[in-house]
């Protein structure tokens, strides 16, 4: 759980807590929408252009590390 204003810019007047989940693809197909225009896999050293005010490279790396560590402890801001 991250405090958005501690990890993302610009700082907002409202408070937002960000939760990150480990998910598993079970099926279905991606549908383009107002939030997400594409869905694909990528390597950590070749990240696509990110909406930094939403997700930073550091947050993606944190999620990757959490997915590989069975003893990962949730980080709370």
Image (cartoon, rainbow, N blue to C red):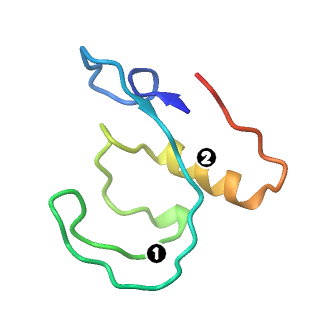
Where residue 4 sits in the image (x, y, percent)? 41, 28
Where residue 21 sits in the image (x, y, percent)? 55, 52
**Outermost residue, top side:** 13
Q: Circles 2 and 1: CB distance less than 8 Å?
A: no
At 66% across and 32% down in the image, what residue appears?
Answer: 75
Q: Mark 1: give few (<14), some (14-19) or many (20+) Cα within 10 Å.
A: few
**62 to the left or right of 15:** right
Residue 62 disc label: 2
Where residue 14 sits in the image (x, y, percent)? 27, 18
Q: Quadrant of the image for the C terminus?
A: top right
| For marks 2 and 1 on the same chain, the one whose residue lies earlier in the sequence | 1
Q: Measure how far apart labels 2 and 1 are at the Cα level.
A: 16 Å
Where residue 13 sits in the image (x, y, percent)? 24, 14
Q: Secondary structure at mark 1?
A: loop
**70 to the left or right of 38:** right
Q: Quadrant of the image for the N terminus?
A: top right
At 76% across and 39% down in the image, what residue appears?
Answer: 73
Task: Check disc 1 and report the residue beneath it.
Answer: 41
């Amino acid at each position: 759980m991250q405090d958005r204003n501690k990890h993302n810019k610009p700082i907002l007047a409202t408070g937002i807590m960000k939760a990150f989940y480990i998910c598993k693809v079970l099926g279905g197909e991606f549908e383009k929408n107002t939030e997400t225009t594409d869905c694909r896999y990528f390597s950590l050293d070749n990240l696509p252009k990110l909406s930094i005010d939403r997700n930073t490279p550091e947050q993606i790396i944190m999620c990757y590390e959490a997915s590989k560590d069975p003893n990962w402890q949730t980080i709370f801001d």
